[in-house]
Amino acid sequence: MAVEQNDLIESDIEAYLHQHENKELLRFITCGSVDDGKSTLIGRLLHDSKMIFEDQLAAINKDSKKHGTTGEAIDLALLVDGLQSEREQGITIDVAYRFFATDRRKFIIADTPGHEQYTRNMATGASTADLAIILIDARHGVQTQTRRHSYITSLLGIKHIVVAINKMDLVDFSEQRFNEIKEQYQVFAKEIGIVNPVFIPVSALTGDNVVNASENMPWNTGVPLMELLDTIPLEDTVNLENFRLPVQYVNRPHLDFRGFCGTIAAGTIKAGDAVTVLPSNKTSIVKQLIQPTIGEENMEIGEAFAPMAVTLTLEDEVDISRGDMIVKSDDIPDVANQFDVTLVWMNEKPMQVGVEYLIKRASNLIPSQFKAVDYKIDVNTLEKLSADELQLNEIGRCQLSLNQTIAFDAYSDIKGTGSFIVIDKYTHATLAAGMILQASTTQASQQTATCQYSAFEKDMNALIRQHFPEWGCRSIEDLL
């Protein structure tokens, strides 16, 4: 793959750049328990797909001899375990990102740590992923941290789960052992809602079934990991049905231009579409779509879709500011300020009910409080436990109250408008990651009553205009 790309670079750099720009992008993470081989797997992917430069390889060879974690063999984990403390201990601590590409796709890999104390780092890496590779040591099977990471990937709505049963060379490439672990994991996956996980037997250390099919496992009928990553469908990872544009910036370079900039969270939009601004409910028509380009003037386009960054202009002068959301007028999301949420707490200082925090949701930054902790989850048993607060790495369902209303979607529908982070009001440290489940039950019933009254009021106003035109009445208020 790399040889063909290098030839194209030498012969026609413009064609190469065009080809590279239009490739699909797959973001994925590796996760699982401690020492299951996550970093080694990524190193093997990069090495066997010829994505390592010669100077990098020489440096890794030198460091492998220095740290001696794999004897005389090269330690490919050092490609991603770059921190000194990671190399000394032979573990992953922070999230490491690596980029590589094939003829078909571009990839961004997040190597996440396996230790329980670094679960927050794993959740950070998983928050932007389309696919998760969950590694399991063939000797040990499903561990506590395997369950924890699987549960978090399920919570975060990652649709594609690949279970790589690693270190098959240490169990003599046993098909029986592979099937035992597969059955064990499937039972747990069903309990947490993971649908159709793909199982692959691999040895990251020796390269079996990573990029090339393994001669040591003729019983395996599936494709190697690299081929799976290159071909797995990505159409269901982005919502293209419901248009949502959180406004990040209002661009006003001169009197004749006012553009509303942001990254499309979901859906598609084109010039001429009717849009509504929330929470003000002001309406207009899209006049232009402008996309920023590098090295040349911005380009007007006919249609834009998630996750493009775009600038909209409207036919009418509408008051729109950062934090507002632009949606299509025939697809209006709910607006609320009280929510049922799932929270992954990431700070040593526990979450406390009644304390004021800042909530960052898309381009909104809003003061807020947690009114109650409904329960926390024991990830091993999936039991719901009573709790008054959440400690580091704990996951729970909570009641969130914002100081202002926002337009939102359930996280399961649209990640960009249903996810948020919790920020310390004074230190600005990130404390937690959250997912909106729904508007709180009390507020939902109030909204239903309001909608019912609005529908009644609309019908009554129409009747008044029809039957009392000579009185000049157009609404209930005019009649009264």
Image (spheres, rainbow, N blue to C red):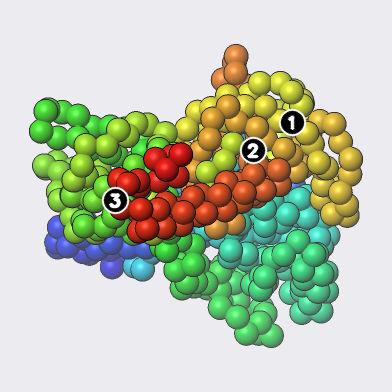
Nearer to us: label 3 or label 1 = 3
Q: Is residue 111 above or below residue 240?
A: above
Residue at 34% from the left image edge and 42% from the top image edge: 282
Q: Nearer the viewer, residue 354 or 215?
A: 354
Amino acid at dot 2 = Gln
Residue that mark 1 sits on: 371
N-term mark: 3 or 1 = 1
Nearer to us: label 3 or label 2 = 3
Residue at disc 2, secondary structure: strand
Q: Which mark is residue 470?
A: 3
Residue at disc 1, secondary structure: strand
Amino acid at dot 3 = Glu
Residue at 62% from the left image edge and 64% from the top image edge: 161
Answer yes or no: is residue 176 visible. yes
Residue that mark 2 sits on: 338
Label 1 crowding class (10 Å Cα cut-off): few <14, some 14-19, many 20+?
some
Q: CA distance from mark 1 to mark 2?
A: 9 Å
N-term mark: 3 or 2 = 2
* Residue 420 x %, y %: 57, 39
Amino acid at dot 1 = Lys
Residue at 62% from the left image edge and 85% from the top image edge: 221
Residue at disc 3, secondary structure: helix
Q: Is residue 429 above or below residue 164?
A: above
Residue found farthest to the top: 426
Q: CA distance from mark 3 to mark 1?
A: 53 Å
